[in-house]
Amino acid sequence: MPEPESNVEADATASANRTTTGTVRLVNAVFYGHHGVMQEEHRVGGRYEVDVSVGLDFEEAAVHDDLTRTVDYEQVYEFVRTLVTENNFYLIEKLAYRIAHKVRDTYPDVEGVEVTVRKPNPPVGGPCDRAEATYTIDDPGT
């Protein structure tokens, strides 16, 4: 049930006197892609797991229940899907970098973006659960 309008106004007035922050995350989005240094990885492909964390003040979105005032994680998922499945990179570092910058370019007012790309069972010559690369943009405005 929607809140009465007077409560929304009271919430907005109370929030004017403080700084707030929040995080919107996608956790373990899974795709099949063709990335890696070895030619076999480009030919056969493999599973990739991606986490995206976006820091922002989403109080206005919460107060007004308004998607246009926050990060649309469905759109972020689509960025990730496209970048993982429609490109071939040698490095998962490049994939993490490209995803983070796509999010930042689409949502320039966010306070930070962190992307982790994982490659389960990487070809490293022995048992290894996963390789991962994390790329962080702390202040995309600079």
Image: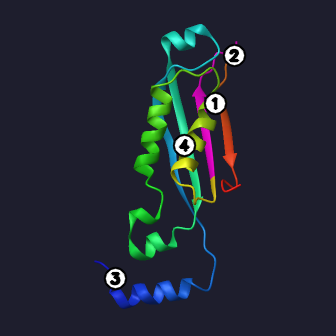
Tell me, for residue 124, which label it has, or none: 2
- Judging depth in this view, the residue of 129 and 46 nearest the camera is 46
Q: Amino acid at mark 3?
A: Glu
Q: Secondary structure at mark 1?
A: helix
In contact (CB < 8 Å): disc 1 and disc 3? no
Q: Which residue is mark 1?
A: 94
Residue plotted at (47% across, 85% down) = 11
Q: In the image, what residue type sits under mark 4? A: Lys
The span from disc 2 to disc 3 (Cα, nearest Å) is 55 Å
1 lies left or right of 8: left
Asked if marks 1 and 4 touch (Cβ < 8 Å), the reply is: no
Please report contact status of discs 3 and 4: CB closer than 8 Å, yes or no: no
How far is mark 1 from mark 3, CA to CA?
Answer: 44 Å
Left or right: residue 115 versus residue 73 is: right
Which disc, if any, is residue 102?
4
Mark 1–mark 4 Cα distance, whole angstroms, equals 12 Å
Start-end of magenta stretch: 113-125
Label 2: few (<14), some or many (≥20) within 10 Å? few
Q: Nearer the viewer, mark 2 or mark 3?
A: 3
